[in-house]
Amino acid sequence: MSGGNEESTARLRRAGLEIIEGRGDTGELPSPGAAWHPLRAYGSEPAAVVYDHRPDATAKLDAEWHRLAVEHRVVDGEGRFLLAVDGRWLPVRLTEGWHLSGASSDADGPAEFLTLSLDGERVLG
């Protein structure tokens, strides 16, 4: 996700994400660019596939992301995680009625976003 700071903040709010203070850990985090590398590596297989021609594609994408994020502890018990925004990690929390795929700035293409657990150990894109 990219875009100007005010634009990004507005997009996050529309997507049902609350920006939170701190991430609860002071360790080093990989840059969002570095975190994408293993996800896009040659031969890597997606954990889930959502076809964008489906009428329910964004809802399905959100559901699959949430399933994997909970299963692999990318999202903590309070709905908190890190989201790549403007080339940096931003701590956010899911609010009622969240729609993470709506946080993507790529309105003409498939939603694309990168998330990281608060401890920096697990990544999901």
Image (spheres, rainbow, N blue to C red):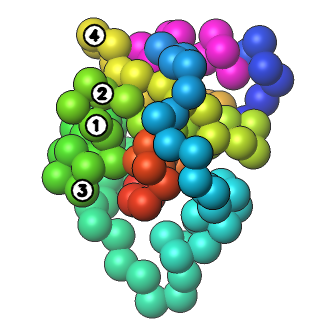
For the stretch drawn in magenta, what is the main secondary structure? helix
Alpha-carbon distance for marks 1 and 2? 5 Å
Q: At numbered mark 4, what does the secondary structure look like: helix, strand or loop?
A: loop
> Mark 2 is on which residue type?
Gly
Query: Which picture quadrant has residue 123?
Result: bottom left
Question: Residue 59 placed where, x, y %?
Answer: 28, 31
Q: Which residues are magenta?
A: 8-17
Callout 1: few (<14), some (14-19), or many (20+) C-alpha neighbours within 10 Å? Answer: some
Q: CA distance from mark 1 to mark 4?
A: 15 Å
Residue at 44% across / 50% down in the picture? 119
What is the number of the mark on residue 72? 3
Mark 2 highlights which residue?
79
Q: Are marks 1 and 2 in contact (CB under 8 Å)?
A: yes
Contact flag, marks 1 and 4 (Cβ < 8 Å): no
State the image coordinates of residue 48 (x, y, percent, origin top left). Answer: 27, 61
Q: Name the residue that disc number 4 marks.
A: 96
> In the image, is 19 to the left or to the right of 119?
right
Q: Residues within 10 Å of mark 4 (few under 14, many from 20)?
A: few
Lateral position of residue 124 relative to residue 78, left or right: right
- Distance from disc 3 to disc 1, alpha carbons, whole Å, reads 10 Å
Which residue position holds label 1? Answer: 76
Discs 2, 4 touching: Cβ within 8 Å:
no
In the image shown, does 108 or 24 lie closer to the viewer?
24
Q: Amino acid at mark 1?
A: Asp
- Work out whether residue 119 can be spotted: yes
x then y, percent, for residue 57: 32, 39
Residue 63 colored in magenta in the image = no
Given contact means CB atoms under 8 Å apart, are the residues at marks 2 and 3 in contact?
Answer: no
Mark before the other along the chain sequence, 1 or 4: 1
